[in-house]
Structures are given as structure tokens and as C-alpha cells.
Image (cartoon, helix red, strand yellow):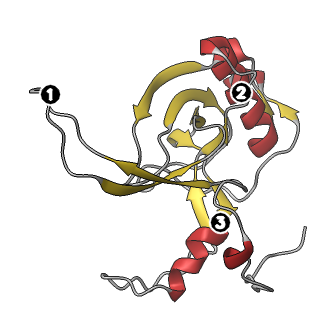
Amino acid sequence: MKEVVGIEVLEDLTARSRCDEGFLHVKRLRARNRYADGSTSREYRVDVVDRPIPDAVAVLVWRRGPAGLEVLTRKTLRPAAHFRAGLPLPLPDPRGYLFVEELVAGVLEPSDHGDPGLLRRAAEEVLEEAGFRVAPGAIRRLGSRKGPPSAGGPPRRCSRPAGPGRWRTPRPRSACGASSNRPRGRSDPEHAR
């Protein structure tokens, strides 16, 4: 696989694009608040960023290794984060974000219903992104984070199952260590607990 070192924008399609197509949708709404006494506020506008399937799963893949607890993170190409470099940021950030370190994760599909669907999707994401086969029954649900990450953000819920894997020991004061040596398509039953 070739190493990505930058992103070249060939064309900005914003002016010709609809706000209800693509991976993210923008809903432009007129709204007002309703109060307990039956009255309402003045109207105001709200922009909401949404996506067709709002919920996602993030998988904390871990194992007990020779150095103790080990976790898996991935460095993933994230163009939207990369383009922060051209924005006037209130707090300057000298770091580049061509790649973002993150947990194994994925958007739920329409067929992913209830805990069985969530755990099946988590197992599929671990195979796709980390190369390990994990039985859905070996994954435990740790909880979920509800609500948008910021004002106007997607109204999503991100469920966090935990799963096994092969990784580095976390650095002190860090939630996880990076792994650049990702196995592909391998079953690791020793760690599927």
C-alpha cells in the first residue's frame, strides 16, 4: 500500500451540492422553544449536521501482554480533520491531522438491531479494521455515549463494546498506544475472552 503524504483538492463542489446528499447532511430548520406554561419563544434558525444512519460502534480492543494491559489504536486518514489547517483557529494548533489515531469503529447498518446487531457489527469492524476474527459473543458492551459531540453535531449514539487483539502497552498519561503493525484476517482465539 502506498503511503499518503497529503491531500490535493481538485474542486470544491459546495456551491453545486445539495445539503441532503453525501455522508453528512445539513438540515436547516426554523424552530421555537415550548415552555412548561404553554408559551413559546420567538422563532430562530437551527442548522443540524446529520447522517443517514446516526449511530456507530467503537471497539476497545485489548489484551494482557508481557508488559501488562495492551490496547489497539489505528491511524486513519481523515480529510476533514486535515483541512482544519486552513481554518482560523482561536487556539493555534501546530499539529497536522492527515491521520487521526482512533479506536476500531464503524457506522451501524440498517440491519443492525438491538444488542445482537451491535455486537455483530463490532465483530465485523474488528475483522475489517484490525484483522482479527472475534465472535460477537466474546465482545462485552461497556456502555454508550449519547448526544452530539458539539452544537449542531450529529445526534448519534456511539456504543462501546470491548474486544481482544494485539497491541502496545499504553504510554503513561495516555489512553492508548499506536499500532502500525496490524495483522490481517487472522484468528486470535487466545485473546477472544
Dot label at residue 8: none
Q: Is residue 29 above or below residue 40?
A: below
Residue 95: % across, % down? 48, 81
Quarter holding residue 97: bottom right
Residue 17 in the figure: left or right of residue 46 = right
The N terminus, quarter of image: bottom right
153 or 91: nearer the viewer: 153
119 or 165: nearer the viewer: 119
Local packing at callout 2 (Cα closer than 10 Å; few below 14, some 14-19, many 20+) is many
Spatial CA distance of label 2 from label 1 is 43 Å
Spatial CA distance of label 3 from label 2 is 21 Å
Q: Amino acid at mark 2?
A: Arg
Residues at circles 3 and 2 in contact by the CB criterion of under 8 Å = no
Residue 162: % across, % down? 56, 28
The residue shown at (21%, 35%) is: 34
Q: Is residue 120 above or below residue 24?
A: above
Q: Amino acid at mark 1?
A: Gly
Which residue does the numbered mark 1 point to in the structure image? 38
The C terminus, quarter of image: top right
Which residue does the numbered mark 3 point to in the structure image? 78
Which residue does the numbered mark 2 point to in the structure image? 121
Residue 44: % across, % down? 30, 56
Spatial CA distance of label 3 from label 1 is 45 Å
